[in-house]
Image: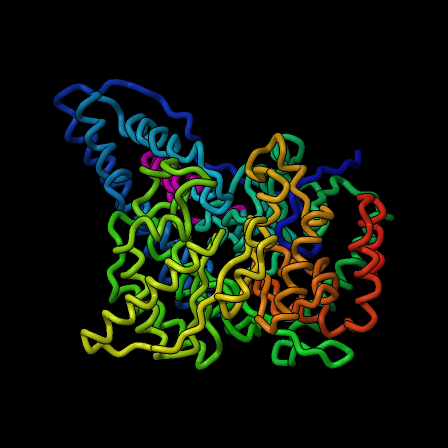
Amino acid sequence: MSFTIHGLGVSGGIAIGHAHLVTSASLEVDHYQIPEEFIAKEVKRFDKAVKQVRTELDWLETDVNTTHKGDASADMAAFVTVHRMILQDPSFSDVPREIIRRESCNAEWALKLQLDELLAHFADVQDEYLRERKTDVRQVAERVIAALGGQDSAVPEKLRERAEDTILVAHDLSPADVILFKDHKVAAFVTDVGGATSHTAILARSLAIPAIVALHTSRELLREDEVIIVDGTQGVVIVDPDETVLSEYRLKQHQWKLERQKLSRIKTASAETLDGVHIELHANIELPIDLDAVKHSGATGVGLFRSEFLFMNRKDLPTEDEQFEAYKAVAEGLKGKPVVIRTLDLGADKTANGPDQASSHSALGLRAIRYCLADPLLFNTQLRAILRAARHGDVRILIPMLAGYNEIKQTLAAIARAKEQLRDEGRKFADKILVGGMIEIPAAAIALPMFLRHLVFLSIGTNDLIQYTLAIDRTDDSVAHLYDPLHPAVLQLVSSVIRQANAANVPVAVCGEMAGDVNMTRMLLGFGLRDFSMHPANVLTVKQRVLMSSVADIEPAVAKILKADDPDKLRSLVEKLNA
């Protein structure tokens, strides 16, 4: 019997194939006492399992760096590195040993107790990306538990023998799973859990493999070898389709492949509309290793370097020299193309000292520029590193979450002090550097003239702007459906910021999810936006839409959208704009 399952499509494309149900290690482990004389042996068993997983991750890292050149290698290497760091963290590798000795319990149970403790720290995390990182901790634990049970990470022989149309169906997939499986004729990924920023989602996009997450019950509803269609664009799994549906989706799949081939041809083309308006398409990155993805995307620079990721998943703070080397590597790697470094967006759920302080500040509390101004030494160290690195490329400073003039004034004064220090010490740095601000809270958008007078460029962070404008915590499942980028209030704010900035000749970009959503491209062009920054995987899709658009034709339609307040009519107008 044919039926459909709906989830969150996180990587576009269509796959038609046979389901292969993947079973991961269970965190439901037995608890039993270990006699005193065997405690040391149990600790050794735990150490051996940790060592085995470390060896597996070492092998994966080598494999990624030697055999997976291209867009996906940076993402894959980064995820393996994160898992290695988690495994090496004393809270993960040492504490269970102490628990074994203290509780006289088996290694699996000791690890489970410590895992529960670590996961509890993520309970109040608001940021979607960071919330997904608890999955990393759980996945590393699963690997160690599997190793304790005598399993290794090799791809099952059954999968090696399968055809190219194999579609993996799992409760969840770790980055290591994805790396292992991707070379074995996997057509798509389907998981019960995960979000738009889960590893499965990010890696699937990098690998251009269709993927749907958050299906909740796929492993219960699907049977091994069952024929399924995965529509990663629509987020739909069609189970046991009839011949008519299969024919329809085979045609769609063919058209999708043709579109991807066309996209690769425009990689080096200038992003220019049909009526000759040039558009800048930049990439968002987290770490220097993302540079490969930027280069392969065709992006003309980095519009958002989330510098806080240099500070996360570690116990200590990066030194000025360490930060300098990271910023310098990106600046030099882009060979003169712009690099916009967002200063630390720490606080709330993003901490510099791991998950121990994950809930120390609320989302509307001491975070981003507020956090930096409250810790001048931390801020000064970063500013000095950026100013030094700016000698090696077109580096610019972007300040997050500014709300008023006092914060702008204090920030500019902090930059001036850092310059003065470097000058006094005889250090080389870029005295002339562009300083911009993020518009991501309604107060900044409404009081924009103040920002236009004191900053030389702006970047709209649509994710937070939407969340704060609508008072919607998008990480809260009970209200997440109310998170609406097409809410008239959001559109008015975004268009107003772009219009005012253009009128003042202050460059303005959009660096939130809106920029990478091709369904928003024409509307943003109609608002007057000429600078988009997005995940590298989205650059070519957005470029294609730019190349097929005429600003002169778009503007009247966008004016109608801005006047609409009926949700159905508004969406109808947007669909018509994109038709």
Q: Quadrant of residue 263?
A: bottom right
Percent position of residue 129, x then y: 49, 47
Question: In the picture, which quadrant includes the N terminus?
Answer: top right
**Residue lying at 63% horizontally and 33% vertically, measured from the top left:** 479
Residue under the image location 55 percent in, 49 percent down = 441
Q: Quadrant of the C terminus?
A: bottom right
Image quadrant assignment for residue 140: top left
Q: Which residue is drawn at 40% across and 65% down?
A: 289
In the displayed structure, does residue 246 sit left or right of residue 393? Answer: right
Image quadrant of residue 186?
bottom right
Q: Which residue lies furthest to the right in this view?
A: 244
Q: Is residue 227 visible?
A: no
Q: In this view, does 5 lie above or below 400?
A: above
Residue 172 x %, y %: 52, 40
Residue 7 horizontal/vertical position (percent): 66, 40
Main SS type for the magenta part?
Answer: helix
Instruction: Decide: is 121 above or below 268.
Output: above
Residue extent of the magenta highlight: 134-158
Nearer to me, 47 or 193: 193
Q: Residue furthest left?
A: 37
